[in-house]
């Protein structure tokens, strides 16, 4: 799960540096250990809609782990963040936020302020 998180942050940071934003994406690991990336054309800003566009009903039987990443605004602070929802078939689900700032000099991730919370089980639990 650490590798999925690191891969998501690295890819999001690359997209932010090139485009100043990024479209939602997912990185998955199947039961054989093979990795794959998923993207969506969805323009929805609903987290549930984004998750549903990047995950499938069959995932519970085919995947070992899944990480969904999206570009979010943090209303309380007015900051932007990379949000990563990671879920493992063993039952672990974690939501992580990595704040970032953009300026004329580029993008700066604030890795000292990563926050984590228990996430909702979406694949190996009730699907919204």
Image: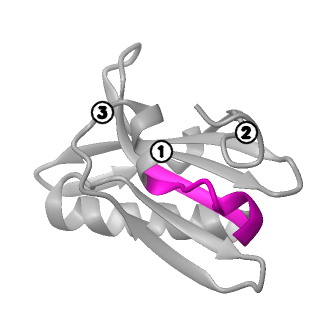
Residue sitting at x 75%, y 43% = 93
Asked whether the residues under the numbered discs 3 and 2 touch, taking CB atoms below 8 Å apart as contact, a structural biologist would say: no
Q: Give the answer, above or below, for where 70 lies relative to 118.
A: below
Q: Residue at x 71, y 51 (%)?
A: 87
Q: Please, is residue 73 above or below residue 55 in the view? A: above
How would you rate the neighbour count of disc 3 (Cα within 10 Å): few for under 14, some for 14-19, many for 20 or more?
few
Q: Which mark is residue 45?
A: 3
Image quadrant where one finds the N terminus: bottom right
Local crowd size for mark 1, using a 10 Å CA cut-off: few (<14), some (14–19), many (≥20): some
Q: Are marks 1 and 2 in contact (CB under 8 Å)?
A: no
Between discs 1 and 2, the one toward the N terminus: 1
Q: Is residue 86 visible?
A: yes
Check contact, mark 3 vs mark 1: CB within 8 A: no
Name the residue carrying label 2: 121
Q: Which residue is mark 1?
A: 52
- Residue 15 position in % (x across, y down): 27, 65
Whether residue 56 appears in magenta in the rendering, the answer is yes
Q: Which residues are magenta?
A: 54-69
């Amino acid at each position: 799960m650490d590798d999925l998180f690191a891969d998501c942050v690295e890819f999001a940071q690359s997209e932010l540096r090139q485009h100043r934003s990024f479209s939602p994406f997912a990185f998955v690991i199947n039961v054989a250990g093979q990795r794959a990336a998923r993207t969506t054309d969805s323009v929805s800003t609903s987290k549930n809609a984004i998750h549903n566009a990047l995950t499938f009903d069959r995932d519970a039987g085919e995947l070992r782990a899944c990480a969904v990443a999206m570009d979010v605004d943090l209303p309380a602070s007015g900051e932007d963040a990379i949000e990563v929802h990671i879920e493992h078939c063993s039952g672990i689900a974690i939501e992580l936020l990595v704040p970032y700032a953009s300026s004329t000099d580029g993008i700066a991730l604030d890795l000292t302020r990563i926050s984590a919370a228990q996430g909702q089980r979406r694949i190996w639990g009730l699907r919204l």
